[in-house]
Amino acid sequence: RCRPETKDGGEPKGPPGVCWPPLLRFLFPPGAERPESTGRLELFARYGPVDEDGSLRGGIRGTHVHSEFEIRQMIKHETKEALLVVLKKPRATAEVIVEGVLPRALEQVYTQAEVRAMLTGVPLDRRGEMKFADLQVVILESRRNRLKALLRDGALSSRGGNTTPRVPFQSKAAQILMQGLDTRKLNFQEENLLKQKRLANYASLLSNLEDQNQSNTLIANTTLMRSLGDVDDRWDRYCAVRRAGRSSYVQARNAPRTPRDGSTYVGDELADRHP
């Protein structure tokens, strides 16, 4: 039992808290080889607490015990809705991005040690139990940070922190694939191949995902678009995409663009930096 009985055999007074044995039984069901502990923990914060057997209940007065299939569907739905909230874009646009990120979000799994480390700051009452409201705040904040990192850095390892490698400027492999198609005279097959390669390289730079079905407009713009530059070019054309660098390196005539305290550099103003 989570709560010790009183001397007269009754339950102690006060609202029931959350103790570790039922919570761990829900997060790591016996017999499960790879339990969805991350999704279960976040589901616990939304629809918990669980009973003493580690089962999540619902329905009228909690008479229904959710099955494994129901829990799996609830995890998928809640994770998708949380990604849409974190993304802060129109739903029609965000759903395309979320569908690609959702499988990686569902693959992340917490160990018991990671769960205990996450909840180590939650205070215990005199009965050794944790308040469910305190657990909700910690778990939901952890979910928000996890999904924001996933959307920002792409695929993360199940232990977190490892981001996918990024190409700093231009790609030498892309330059090799485009060689032979920069001549003035092309036959019909070479012209179609050039359109296909330019669409693959430049279409995502010209329009958002919801506008990728406008084929005629994209073909016309990719044909007019100039090259991204030489492979050895050291000028970063994607500083706005990376949210780094200054919006302009031109000095103003009347006032300096960067605040200075005497001869000491203080830093860029917010207007001088890319959004």
Image: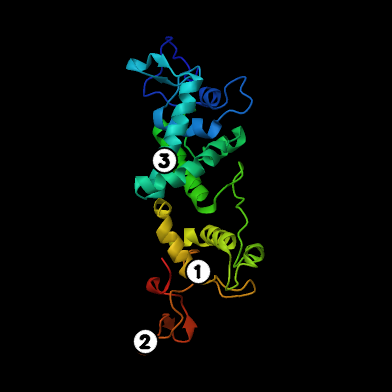
In the image, residue 159 above or below residue 169: above
- Mark 2 vs 3, N-terminal side: 3
How far is the residue under mark 2 from the one under mark 3?
45 Å
Taking depth in this image into account, of 248 and 134 the one nearest to the observer is 248
Q: Residues within 10 Å of mark 3 (few under 14, many from 20)?
A: some
Disc 1 designates what residue? 239
Q: How many marks?
A: 3
Helix, strand or loop status at disc 2: loop
Three-letter code for the amino acid on which mark 3 is drawn: Ala
Q: In this view of the protein, which residue sits in the foreground, 151 or 98?
A: 98
Relative to the observer, which residue lies in front, 163 or 51? 163
Sequence-wise first label, 3 or 1? 3
Q: What's the residue at 43%, 82% (across, down)?
A: 260
Distance from disc 3 to disc 1, alpha carbons, whole Å, reads: 29 Å
Asked if the residues shown at circle 1 and circle 2 are in contact, with their CB atoms under 8 angstroms apart, the answer is no
Distance (Cα) linking label 1 and label 2: 25 Å
Give the percent coordinates (x, y) of residue 142: 48, 43
The residue drawn where x is 53% and y is 35% is: 38
Tell me if residue 99 comes above or below residue 197 in the rendering: above
Residue under pointer 3 = 82
Quickly name the residue at label 2.
255
Q: Residue furthest top?
A: 9
Which amino acid, by three-letter code, is at mark 1?
Answer: Cys
